[in-house]
């Protein structure tokens, strides 16, 4: 359970990283002209879609991990393979986590690397579409956009040993990001809607947070991202340890 | 050629074919060649913030959401989560999956069901039918299991198959649009819009509405959509799609611009000289579109095979389900049948030929070479010989004056008379003489001018009858040319006599020089193992030396147009498939009679009409390149067909024997289409880059052999 708490914390802190990309999405999702409750519902649906994608990824990756190595008793070839997988996953997580500390300048835009840019651009059309389907679809597809945080936890999910364990890892991470993303998107707008009465004008569909917010929040965002990086490195170390020291498989 | 050309797909630009679908999107009626293109178009034009465009993405997203939940429950089931004390959960979980799968089928399955139904209404079984039957069977069987409290449901299989097929269609459309991207400028002529300037106002209008005399503004980077003359502005235009020349041509006031060329960095004000529908670009566009719509032999064969293949697969699926059902459980039967249906989807087969041909046609068109369809490429690839016409094909269209002799008159006088008569005719010899005389003296006026085709010209100058023409023509007038005049002329030249007052006073000798690249082209054809033949209407004395100089395999002289046809047919009977390369009015019938008729630029309209291939003016050297392209396209088509058939054969065997999970089969199927699309695309890209290298090397071989 401790581990899942740590993942949750990483997700929570990692949302500071999400603000850069997905936060832009969430903000761009905008307010519902029908009122605050509708706006909140819109953002809830979006986040449910996003977390569902994460959970699915976790379960599939976990299942694939099992398929790859089988789940025989300890000491068998399958167990050795699983431990190797844990080491590889852990190292991958440490590498990803370390990137959150520095070298941000050398980081390339992940969207561009994978060629998901046209998809991201296309997603914009969903922002203005009415109905509950659009935010759900937006969230689901958003969940599949490349993101180093997702990669890191997918790696851990692969080493989970079962589909359910993988699902749990990604669900903990998703729930961690849930609050922050809801706060950035829905709550922010909800607040603004309350302050500035009925606001019909749709929010600027931008992929970057508003410049003022960015300037004010940059400091604690950097701290948040570093904290997330720390959590991921720590989790990576635990995962590696589980591979190296057989006993630590029962650590949690 | 079809009378009503098939419309182009709004996404990939290829003709939609018989099973095209029409959709009302963004206020326009658009055609799509397949579901994948329709889907991809909507996804990519979502940025236009159209609610309709968003609908496709919403469907995908919601479908994915439902499918993910179905899969999550199934994983729970596979992992043994619904056994032991949790077994009571099984029935509600299955019911929940059913509840999730029903809207999923409506959302993701509807396009497939609609496609299958549409084809069925036209009496055809489409690949969509295989998907539909498979998915509906899995769904119906699972629903029946839920109602009867059965242990196994396959909602996950049905949803994954639908999801993977949707993804596959999307990726396939992306592969195709990449492959067809190079065709876009060729096909854009009909959709082009122009800025018509009228006084101070400027309006955006479709190019078809442009009339001669209208003023148009062309912005930097835009494609010039009309033929016209520059009134104002300064720029440079890339005319490569018309001439194959990639160097930008400078354009200042007074310069001619051609529709289809790409404007450089300056703004041009252009006055249209012809109607928007009459430009060469518009004609090229129509030709390229027709070429893409024309079915090649490989394409037709594949289509026939697929038509037999689909009912066969349905039977095979039923048979394998039946045999598995006899030996095992109903679940085994369903899975085996489903795997057969899903894996056999011959989507990649349908892609194999059109993609490779479209690429080759596009690359040729970018060099100004027009190819009439994939069938022509297939015929080019199996040529055994190439026959050439002489004048205007192997020799330059313009004759060169080589020698001038006078007898009983001054050189100037001979030239003055010859030039005055020659101005009245458009014969190549007349043009050469008129050009030669042009600088010499002011031309006297000609009365009672008469042109006698094939012989010469006669008219009255300063009251005296004077004539210009062949020695035979002079003899027919009773004017014997002095032997000394004829003897002085160089060999292999065409002699034109000038006479008046009852005798011949002068002779102009004209020679037709071989085009500089001709020897290299002939050598390149020989290296490809092709035989060559020269068929000419000219005299043997002129034909034989040229055949020898170029190293041609054989020659025949003094042929009338119908003799040329007969000679070519005799040669074709011995050799097999032969091409005829020609130019000039007389070549129309012989071009039509050849396996492949090739018209070289400047070709008259009649010759072009009967030609399968048109080379740009003065680019005979494009012929070996085109043969290379045709070979590459054939190899690519064969490899693709072999891959698709081989893959289907292996996968079907595995599926029929129950060794393949339906979900894996669907993933393999989608993969196969992507592989074929990627292969064609890569082959095209390879050809382009190889070409860039070759473009630099075109000159050296010519220089070496010259």
Image: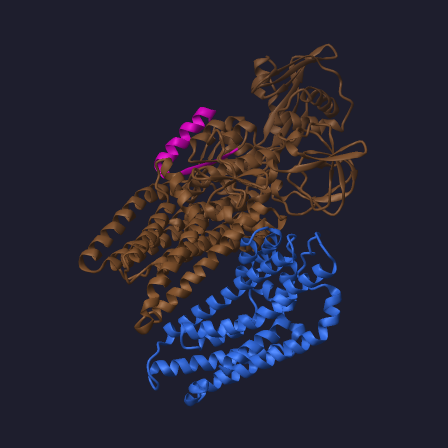
Chain colours: A blue, B brown
Q: Is residue B562 magenta?
A: yes
The answer to whether residue B657 is seen in the rendering is no
Residue placed most toward the observer, B394 or B283: B283
Residue placed most toward the observer, B536 or B578: B578
- Farthest residue, direction right: B200
Asked if B407 appears above or below B447 in the picture, the reply is below
Asked if B562 appears above or below B642 in the picture, the reply is above
Q: Relative to B314, is B578 on the left or the right?
A: right
Asked if A47 appears above or below B704 in the picture, the reply is below
Q: Relative to B351, is B690 on the left or the right?
A: right
Q: Is residue B525 magenta?
A: no
Snapshot quadrant of residue A103: bottom right
Count of marks placed on residues: 0
Q: Position of residue B345 (x, y in %)?
A: 36, 50
Q: Residue at x 35, y 52 (%)?
A: B135
The main secondary structure of the magenta stretch is: helix
Q: Position of residue B361 (x, y in %)?
A: 51, 43
Q: Residue at x 57, y 71 (%)?
A: A148
Q: Residue at x 39, y 59 (%)?
A: B97
- Farthest residue, direction left: B326
Numbered range of the magenta stretch: B559-582
Snapshot quadrant of residue A30: bottom right
Q: Position of residue B550 (x, y in %)?
A: 51, 42
Q: Position of residue B140 (x, y in %)?
A: 32, 51
Residue placed most toward the observer, B597 or B363: B363
The answer to whether residue B469 is seen in the rendering is yes
């Amino acid at each position: 359970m401790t581990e899942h708490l740590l993942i949750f914390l990483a997700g929570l802190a990692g949302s500071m990283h999400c603000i850069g990309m997905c936060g832009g999405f969430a903000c761009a999702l905008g307010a519902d002209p029908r009122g605050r409750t509708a706006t909140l519902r819109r953002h809830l649906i979006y986040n449910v879609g996003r977390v569902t994608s994460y959970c699915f990824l976790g379960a599939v990756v976990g299942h694939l991990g099992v398929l790859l190595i089988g789940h025989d008793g300890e000491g068998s070839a399958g167990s050795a393979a699983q431990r190797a997988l844990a080491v590889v996953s852990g190292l991958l997580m440490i590498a990803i986590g370390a990137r959150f500390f520095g070298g941000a300048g050398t980081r390339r835009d992940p969207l561009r690397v994978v060629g998901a840019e046209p998809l991201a651009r296309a997603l914009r059309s969903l922002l203005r579409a009415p109905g509950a389907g659009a935010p759900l679809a937006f969230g689901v597809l958003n969940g599949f956009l490349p993101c180093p945080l997702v990669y890191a936890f997918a790696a851990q999910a692969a080493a989970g040993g079962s589909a359910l364990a993988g699902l749990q890892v990604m669900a903990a991470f998703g729930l961690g990001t849930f609050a922050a993303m809801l706060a950035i998107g829905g709550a922010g707008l909800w607040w603004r809607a309350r302050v500035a009465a009925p606001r019909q004008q749709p929010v600027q569909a931008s992929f970057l947070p508003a410049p003022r917010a960015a300037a004010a929040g940059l400091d604690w965002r950097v701290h948040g991202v570093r904290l997330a990086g720390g959590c991921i490195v720590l989790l990576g170390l635990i995962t590696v340890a589980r591979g190296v020291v057989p006993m630590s498989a029962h650590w949690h | 050629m079809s009378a009503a050309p098939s419309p182009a797909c709004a996404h990939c630009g290829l003709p939609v074919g018989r099973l095209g679908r029409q959709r009302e999107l963004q206020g326009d009626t658009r055609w799509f060649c397949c579901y994948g293109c329709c889907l991809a178009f909507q996804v990519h034009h979502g940025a236009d913030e159209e609610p309709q465009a968003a609908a496709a993405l919403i469907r995908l997203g919601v479908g994915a959401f439902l499918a993910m939940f179905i899969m999550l429950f199934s994983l729970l089931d596979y992992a043994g989560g619904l056994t032991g004390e949790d077994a009571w959960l099984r029935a509600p979980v299955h019911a929940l999956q059913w509840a999730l799968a029903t809207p999923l089928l409506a959302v993701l399955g509807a396009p497939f069901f609609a496609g299958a139904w549409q084809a069925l209404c036209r009496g055809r079984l489409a690949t969509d039918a295989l998907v539909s039957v498979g998915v509906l069977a899995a769904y119906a069987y699972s629903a029946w299991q839920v109602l009867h409290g059965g242990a196994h449901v396959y909602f996950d299989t049905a949803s994954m198959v639908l999801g993977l097929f949707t993804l596959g269609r999307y990726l396939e459309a992306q592969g195709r649009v990449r492959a067809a991207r190079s065709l876009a400028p060729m096909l854009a002529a009909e959709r082009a819009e122009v800025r018509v300037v009228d006084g101070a106002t400027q309006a955006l209008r479709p190019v078809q509405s442009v009339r001669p005399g209208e003023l148009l503004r062309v912005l930097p980077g835009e494609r010039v959509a009309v033929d016209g003359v520059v009134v104002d502005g300064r720029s440079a235009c890339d005319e490569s799609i018309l001439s194959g020349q990639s160097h930008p041509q400078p354009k200042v006031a007074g310069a001619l611009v051609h529709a289809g060329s790409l404007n450089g960095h300056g703004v041009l004000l252009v006055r249209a000289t012809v109607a928007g529908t009459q430009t060469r670009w518009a004609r090229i566009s129509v030709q390229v579109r027709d070429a893409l719509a024309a079915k090649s032999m490989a394409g037709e064969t594949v289509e026939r095979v697929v038509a037999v293949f689909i009912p066969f697969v349905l039977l095979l699926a039923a048979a394998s389900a039946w045999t598995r059902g006899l030996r095992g459980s109903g679940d085994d039967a369903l899975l085996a049948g489903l795997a057969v249906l899903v894996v056999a989807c011959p989507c990649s087969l349908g892609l194999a030929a059109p993609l490779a041909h479209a690429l080759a046609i596009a690359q040729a068109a970018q060099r100004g070479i027009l190819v009439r369809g994939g069938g022509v490429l297939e015929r080019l690839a199996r040529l055994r010989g190439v026959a050439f016409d002489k004048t205007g094909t192997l020799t330059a269209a313009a004759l060169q004056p080589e020698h001038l002799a006078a007898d009983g008159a001054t050189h100037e006088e001979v030239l003055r008379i010859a030039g005055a008569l020659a101005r009245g005719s458009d014969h190549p010899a007349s043009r050469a003489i008129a050009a030669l005389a042009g600088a010499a003296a002011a031309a006297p006026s000609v009365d009672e001018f008469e042109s006698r085709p094939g012989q010469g010209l006669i008219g009255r100058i300063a009251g005296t009858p004077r004539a210009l023409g062949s020695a035979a023509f002079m003899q027919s007038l009773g004017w014997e040319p002095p032997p000394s005049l004829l003897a002085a002329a160089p060999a292999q030249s065409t002699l034109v006599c000038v006479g008046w007052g009852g005798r011949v006073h002068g002779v102009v000798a004209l020679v037709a020089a071989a085009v500089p690249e001709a020897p290299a082209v002939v050598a390149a054809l020989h290296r490809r193992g092709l035989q060559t033949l020269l068929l000419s209407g000219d005299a043997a004395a002129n034909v034989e030396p040229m055949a020898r100089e170029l190293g041609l395999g054989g020659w025949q002289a003094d042929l009338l147009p119908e003799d040329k046809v007969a000679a070519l047919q005799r040669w074709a009977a011995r050799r097999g498939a032969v091409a005829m390369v020609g130019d000039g009015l007389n070549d129309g019938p012989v071009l039509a009679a050849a396996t492949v008729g090739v018209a070289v630029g400047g070709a008259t309209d009649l010759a072009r009409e009967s030609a399968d291939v048109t080379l740009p003016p003065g680019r005979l050297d494009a012929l070996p390149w085109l043969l290379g392209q045709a070979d590459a396209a054939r190899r690519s088509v064969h490899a693709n067909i072999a891959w698709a058939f081989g893959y289907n054969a292996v996968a079907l065997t595995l599926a029929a024997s129950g060794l393949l999970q339906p979900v894996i089969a669907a993933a393999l199927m989608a993969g196969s289409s992507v592989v074929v699309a990627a292969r064609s695309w890569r082959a095209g890209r390879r050809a382009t880059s190889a070409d860039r290298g070759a473009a630099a090397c075109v000159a050296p071989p010519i220089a070496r052999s010259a």
